[in-house]
Amino acid sequence: MSLVEWSRFAMAIQIEPAMTVSEYLEWEKRQEVRHEYIDGEIIEMTGGTRQHSEIMINLTLAIGRQLDDSPCGLQSSTMRVKIGQNRYVYPDLSAVCGEGLMEDERELTLLNPILVVEITSPSSLVYDRVDKFGFYFGVPSIETYLIVDQDRVRADICTRTDEGWLVRVFNHPEDVIPLTAIECELPLAQVYRGIAFARA
């Protein structure tokens, strides 16, 4: 086998055919862990850290208690969200106001969130702050994208404007984040309540 033939053979082995949307949706039903789907690429959702879990609980409680008499409601990270023709993700939290539009009869995929929340870690930093930053803006219903750091006191709130995302950074425990899309306020102290950060 010549060098050229070997190169072609090696490339044929390494390149796997992309999974179609319909194949992904059927395959995902049989999986024990969740997977996101971005333009044919499968991204496994690895288990979160203790801090990630505690912050998610804090967020759910802090926001959820303000929605008792609201037309808006929260969805957990088990709710899949469609963010494009070939893109499906599992935000840590999402919110919908009014009727939630679903893609399927089993109501596994939400189409119209107004708010999405991602708790970011060093391993997901680029994905959450760069890739999803653009993906979420492509969903007309999403008015707010909240990125919460799990390893330090910091939250970035991205609000939709006619010119693009307006980004504001909150990094003081006394800060209060305005979630105007769902008419709530989120004290940063409540987000990080009980969290002990590792010392550098």
Image (tube, rainbow, N blue to C red):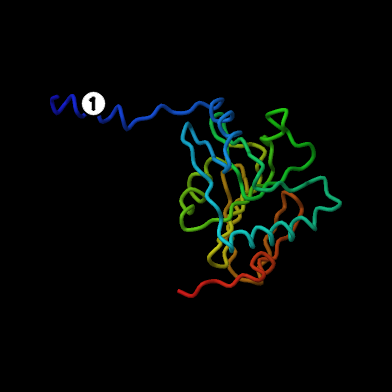
Q: Residues within 10 Å of mark 1 (few under 14, many from 20)?
A: few
Q: Report the amino acid beneath label 1.
A: Arg
Total marks in image = 1
Residue 112 image position (x, y, % from top left): 69, 37
Residue bearing mark 1:
8
Q: Residue furthest left?
A: 2
Frontmost residue, 140 versus 111: 111
Quadrant for the N terminus in the image: top left
Frontmost residue, 176 versus 113: 113
169, above or below 140, in the image? below
Relative to 35, is 73 on the left or the right?
Answer: right
Task: Report the residue at 73% width, 43% height from top.
Answer: 96
Residue 146 image position (x, y, % from top left): 61, 53
Task: Report the residue at 57% width, 38% height from top.
Answer: 31
Q: Residue furthest right?
A: 69
Frontmost residue, 146 versus 41: 41
9, above or below 188, in the image? above
Relative to 105, is 154 on the left or the right?
Answer: left
Residue 193 image position (x, y, % from top left): 67, 69
Circle 1 sits in a helix, a strand or a loop, which is it? helix
Residue 163 image position (x, y, % from top left): 57, 43
Quadrant for the C terminus in the image: bottom left
Q: Residue furthest bottom?
A: 199
Residue 59 falls in image quadrant: bottom right
Relative to 198, is 72 on the left or the right?
Answer: right
Task: Report the residue at 57% width, 34% height from top.
Answer: 28
